Amino acid sequence: MDPRLKIILYGNPDEELSLLMRVEKEKEYPDHCKIISEFGTVVSIRTQRRFLCSIYNSKKVKSLKAPSVVPANDGIELQPETKILDKKNDVIDDTVSNVVFGIIDFGFDFTHPDFITNGKTRFEKIWIQSDRYDGNEFGYGRIVTKAQINEALLDDFPFKKLGYHPGKSDLFGNGTHGTHVLGIACGNGAVAPKSFAPNVPIIAVDMGTNLVNGSNLSLGDSVKGAEGLCFITTEAGKRPLVINMSLGGHGDAHMGKTLFEQIIDHIVTTRKGTAIVQSTGNYHQANAHTYGDIKLNQKVKIPWMFKKHDRTPNEMEIWYHGDDVLSVDIYDDDMKLLLSSTPFKDELIVKENDEVGICLHRSNEPNTGKNQINILVNGKLKSKFWTIELIGKTVKNGRYHCYIERDDGGQSIFLPAVANKTHTTNSICNSKYSIVVGAYNQNDDAKPILSFSSSGPTADGRMKPEVVAPGFKIKSSCSSSSRENRASNKLTSKSGSSMASPYVASLVMKILEKEPHLDIISIRKKLFDACDTAFFKDSNLEVFRAGHGYVNPNKIK
C-alpha cells in the first residue's frame, strides 16, 4: 500500500477522502467511489475512509494513491527589485487568440493592466480552490467568471467586490508567484515586457492554501492539481491549449509514473493542439538527493542532517529495483541504534521510549515496479543528524535513489559529501510528453545555467529538462500587496526555472496560433528544432541540465 495511504488509513470512518486511482480498464470502477475527474484509466475520486481498504483490494484497481503535496517552485530571491512605472501603455486590441492559456499556480491579480484589454479582463474563469464552496461539480472552492471579474473591475474596491485578493499573503509587496508567471507567459505589454502571446484568453486555477485529509499544507496537492487540469481542459473546449505549471517537490520515483504525471501524458496525447509546460525545479544545490549501487551484504551509510530546533516533519524516500531486497538500520547522532528494520514490514522509530517516526516499506509499487522505503520523522525530533544504513539482503540490480522531501519550514539535507546533483528534477515533471524547462542567465554572454536550476536525467534515463530559457532577474507583472486595493503599474523581478517555463509556454502558444491542430510530438519537435545547442567546457554533467539547448524565438517556424 502507498505509504501516504497507510498514514490516512485510520480515523473517522465517515470522513470523505480525496484520492487518485488507476483502474485496470476504463470506466470500470469499484463500489463506493464517486468519480470527480477522468483521464483514461486514471481518475480522482471521493470515498469514505471505511471503504478505503475494499477499494484498494478490488481487482478493478491497479493503483490507489493518497494526495501528495504539490508546492510551487518559488522564484529564488536574488535582490528582488520592485518598480512602479510612471504610466502604462494603453492596450487597445480587438484581437483574441485562438489558443487558450491555462495556469495552475497561486495569486492572480486580475486588476493588473497586463491582463486587461479594452478595459475588459482576459480571464475567462478563475477557480479559487481554497475559497468557500459555491456548489461546483468538484465539491470545493469557488469559480469566478469573466462577467464577475469585469463587474469587480468597475468597483473602487475590486478585490473586496469579487471576494478574492491575490496578494493576501504578500506582506512585503514582492509580488505573488502566479501573477509574475502569468505576465511572462501572456502579458499584453501594458506594464511588463510584451509576451509572445499577448492576446490569449486565460483560464486559471489558484491552488491557494488547502487542507489535505486534515493536514494544513503550504499550497495544493496532487488530487486538486489533477482536478485543476480537468477544469482547464473542460473550459477550453476544443480550442488549442497550453498549460503552465511551475510546481513540484523533491520526492517520488522520478520515472514519470506518478498518477499525476500519467494524467499529464494522457491529456497531451489524446487532445490535439495541447501542450503542458513545466519548470524543472530549483533543486540542483538542495542536497536532497543521493544515489548509488549496493552489493550483496554491503552496508551503505547515508548521513541525514536536520536543522537546529527543527520541529517540522521530515521525510526521506528510498526507491530501489523490484528484484532487490534492502533493509534499513537507523542511528541517531550518538550512533545509538533506533531501528533495525525487517524488509517489507512497517515499524515505529523509537528514541528514549518516545515514538519519533515510522519506517514504511513496500514491494513492487504498481506504477514503477520499484520497491519503496519511506522514513517519516515527526516534530519531536531532537537530533542534529541521523545515519541511514542501507543493507543489501538480495541484490540483482543494486541501484538505489534517495530523496529528502521538500520542507519549506525546516529543510533537512544529506551530508553534502554524499549528495548528488543529477536526477533533481521536481517530483511531477518527469512524464514522457511534458515540456520541461531549465533556467539560464540571459544577461551573461556565456549563458550559464543558473546554479539552482535542477538537473536530469530521470531515474529511467530520459532527458529532463528538455530546454533552457531565460530565468535570471526576469522583470514581469507584480501583483498588489495585501495592503493595496488595486494593482498599480508595478513590475518585480524574480529568478528561477519558474520564470523560464512560462517563457517557453508563450512560444508554444505562438506555434499553436499558426498550426492549431499539431499533436504533441510535432509541437515538441518544432520547439526543440528552434534551440541553439549548448556547449559546456567545465562539466560534462551540464548536458543533463540543458537538454536540447537554449530556446531561440527567432528560429520558431
Image (tube, grey):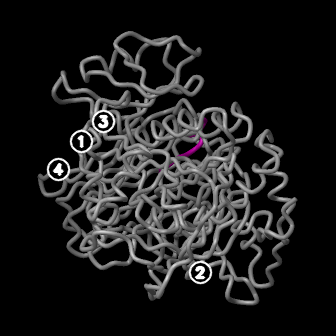
- First in sequence: mark 4 or mark 2? 4
Q: Position of residue 467 (x, y in %)?
A: 73, 64
Question: What is the crowding at mark 4: few (fewer than 14 residues within 10 Å), some, or many (at least 20)?
Answer: some
* Residue sitting nearer the eye, 487 or 527: 487
Q: Which range of residues does the magenta coloring cover?
A: 318-324
Local packing at callout 1 (Cα closer than 10 Å; few below 14, some 14-19, many 20+) is few
Q: Is residue 42 left or right of residue 546?
A: left
**Residue at 65%, 68% in the rendered image:** 195
The residues tagged by marks 1 and 3 sit, at their Cα atoms, a distance apart of 7 Å
- Callout 3 amino acid: Tyr
Rounded to the nearest whole Å, what is the CA distance between mark 2 and mark 1?
Answer: 37 Å
Compare marks 2 and 1 and give the one earlier in the sequence. Answer: 1
For this orientation, the residue located farthest to the left is 353
For marks 2 and 1, give the one nearer the viewer.
1
Q: Kindly identify which residue carries mark 3.
A: 140
Q: CA distance from mark 4 to mark 1?
A: 37 Å
In the displayed structure image, the side of residue 428 where residue 316 appears, left or right = left
Secondary structure at numbered mark 4: strand
Instruction: Look at mark 1 in the image and give the residue it sits on.
Output: 132
Q: Can you say whether 114 is above or below 372 in the image? A: below
Quickly name the residue at label 2: 472
Q: Work out whether mark 4 precedes mark 1 in sequence or the reverse, and give the earlier one.
A: 1
* Residue 469 in the image: above or below residue 278: below
* Disc 2 residue crowd, few under 14, some 14–19, many 20+, Cα 10 Å: many
Q: Quadrant of residue 244?
A: bottom right
Point 24% across, 50% down: residue: 216
Disc 1 and disc 3 in contact, CB within 8 angstroms: no
**Image quadrant occupied by the C terminus:** bottom right
Q: Is residue 417 magenta?
A: no
Residue 355 circle label? 4
| Image quarter (top left, top right, bottom left or bottom right) of the N terminus | top left
